[in-house]
Amino acid sequence: MALLGNPFVANVAKQMTEEETIQALRVDLAGELEAIIGYEAHAMSTSDERVKKVLYHVADEERQHVGELQQLLYILCPKEAENMEKGKQSIIQQQQQNFQGEMQ
Ligand SMILES: [Fe+2]
């Protein structure tokens, strides 16, 4: 944490291209999912109801961040949204067939 005393520690050398921004958003999404897993693991690991309450609340906030980043990614990369929708529809179709149909 000593790095936080350095006012230049978060500076970056260049601006990202659009492709790099898209990749950065995917990395950010992974970070949000990792945060949810961490908060919930800590909440499950304590018997202190106060701590559980706050950690589950924070985990839900991270879920909102996932939605925000996901939507931003869809705006920057419509093909990503198209593929995600295909995946969702594939599972909806499987569910309608009680998961007995062929995967498309
Ligand atoms: Fe977050």
Image (spheres, helix red, strand yellow):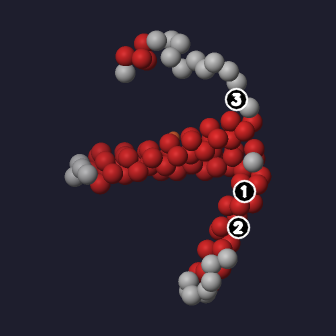
Report the disc number at residue 81: 1
Does mark 1's beta carbon lie closer than 8 Å to ligand 1?
no
> Percent from the top left, x then y, of residue 10?
54, 20
In percent of the image, x 52 and y 50: which residue is there?
Answer: 63
Rendered position, 79 above or below 104: above
Rendered position, 25 above or below 46: above
Q: Quadrant of residue 16?
A: top right
Name which of mark 2 and mark 3 comes first in the sequence: 3
Name which of mark 2 and mark 1 comes first in the sequence: 1
Q: Callout 3: helix, strand or loop? A: loop
Residue ID for mark 3: 16
Q: Nearer the viewer, residue 35 or 60?
A: 35
Label 2 is placed on what type of residue?
Lys
Residue ID for mark 2: 86
* Label total for image: 3
Q: Callout 2: helix, strand or loop? A: helix
Residue lying farthest to the left in this orientation: 47
Question: How far, Cα to Cα, is label 2 from label 1?
Answer: 9 Å
Q: Callout 1: helix, strand or loop? A: helix
Q: Which corner quadrant holds the N terminus?
A: top left
Label 3 is placed on what type of residue?
Met
